[in-house]
Amino acid sequence: MAGQGLSTDEIQGIREALAAGRKPRVVFTEAAGQMAGQLGQVVELTDPAASEEFVVVRFGRDELPFSPADVAIAPKGAGRRPATEAKPEPAQPPAAPEPEFVLDTPRVPAPRREEPKAEAPPAEPKPAKRAVKAAKPKTPPGLTVTLAYAEGEWTVAAQQGTKALARPYVVKPAEALRMVALVDVPGVQEAVEQILAAERAEAEQQAEKLRAELAEIEARLAELREAR
């Protein structure tokens, strides 16, 4: 039976063996449940940070993830088939006796003897089988989509786990308002509307100021034209 599971040095050795194209043989420990004592091959080491069951073992036609405590390095020579023993030849049945030649002798039937019926012993209850440890599916990292407002601009960014899927890029205020409307959170939607209202008021003030400056420039231009 296997020992206490894989140590840190043994995991590193398996990783180097996989990199060299080999598939190390392991034996399931008692922590693996019903498969304890069976042999398998390590075909992959996944990310230990994503799941504690990162040792992928091929067992028959299946490839399932296990934790380092579920397997141990298989001893040398384990799994080899012993030499086949010579099968004994079946014994020849004894020759049937030749029939006796009887002349004018009546055949008296032998009395029929009833054999006592032997009662079958009660069946012993079978021990309950330990359930095979189900492989946990590897869950994908979380996805985060961020809508942000800063310095008069709306930006959207997306990130999955530690990987950036989309760097912050600028979107129009109307698109930002539509995104917030999909969330259907009154407090957030009111905050966005207040920001848009403040931007709208500031833009109108700038437009009025520019129109006044343009009117002054037009009047000045008209005076210059009359002075010719």
Image: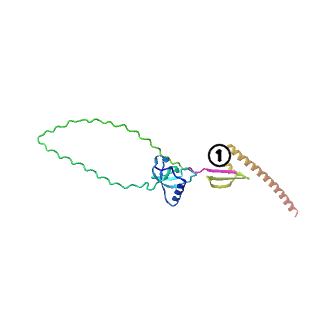
Work out whether residue 211 or residue 176 is closer to the camera in this orientation and state it.
176
Q: In the figure, is residue 224 to the left or right of 194? A: right
Q: Is residue 185 magenta?
A: no
Q: Which residues are magenta?
A: 139-148
Which residue is outermost to the left? 104
Above or below 130: residue 77: below
Secondary structure beneath label 1 = helix
Q: Which residue corresponds to the image point at 52% horizontal and 57% vertical from the top-left?
A: 13
Q: Residue 73: x and y, percent?
A: 49, 54
Residue closest to the eye, 219 or 200: 200
Q: What amino acid does circle 1 point to?
A: Val
Q: Residue at x 73, y 46 (%)?
A: 194
Q: Which residue, given by chain and number where applicable, does mark 1 sit on?
A: 183
Q: Residues within 10 Å of mark 1 (few under 14, many from 20)?
A: few
In the rendered image, residue 20, in percent from the top left (x then y), is placed at 51, 61
Looking at the image, which residue sits at the far bottom?
Answer: 228
